[in-house]
Image (tube, rainbow, N blue to C red):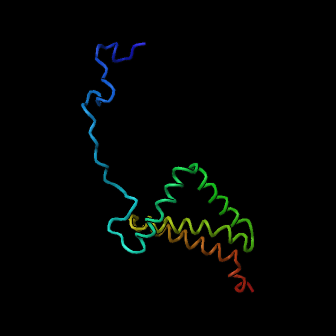
Amino acid sequence: MATNDDRRGRPRPRPGSGGARGPRQKRPLPQGEQFFTPGATGLRKAVETRSAAPLAYLFTQVPRWLTPAVLVVLLLAGFAVAGWPGGLAVLPVLAFVAWLAYLSWPSLGIGGRLLRVVMLVFLVVLAADRFGVFQSFQR
């Protein structure tokens, strides 16, 4: 069966020739966000470097839906289960959100930073409540 190019009388480009535009040239990467903070030193550089492998694993080897689904289940368990088991369920969610907040902090505006701080405070208060920190205030 003929292709549209054959029907119009145009020659089809040879494979590997780059088509009608000529040989393929590598384009520079677009300017945008980078995974590593430019000029980072000390703790930030260490955290970003050590986070590269787990992030690559999460985004390539694990189904995309699995990480958010596990975090939602753990958060719901933290809401539903009273006592220290609920607090234990919230701790991985708190750690994950804190990790992402730390990694994204340099590229955020004031609104994004405020939202992450509010989320972290909420998760800390939820975990503290489940561990019974506020029991002495109820008497």
Residue at 62% from the left image edge and 60% from the top image edge? 71
- Out of 49 and 117, give the one closest to the viewer: 49
- Out of 50 and 119, give the one closest to the viewer: 50
- Out of 47 and 5, give the one closest to the viewer: 47
Above or below 9: residue 125: below
Q: Where residue 126 appears, x then y in whole percent?
A: 64, 72
| Screen quadrant of the N terminus | top left
Q: Where residue 32 appears, x then y in whole percent?
A: 34, 55
Residue at 29% from the left image edge and 13% from the top image edge? 9
Instruction: Residue 103: name its quadrant.
Output: bottom left
Q: How many marks?
A: 0
Residue at 40% from the left image edge and 59% from the top image edge? 35
Residue 28 is left or right of residue 129, and the answer is: left
| Screen quadrant of the C terminus | bottom right
Residue at 56% from the left image edge and 73% from the top image edge? 121
Q: Where residue 78 appears, x then y in whole percent?
A: 69, 67
Above or below 3: residue 90: below
Q: For the view shown, which residue lies furthest in the left direction?
A: 22
Q: Where residue 68 appears, x then y in whole percent?
A: 59, 55
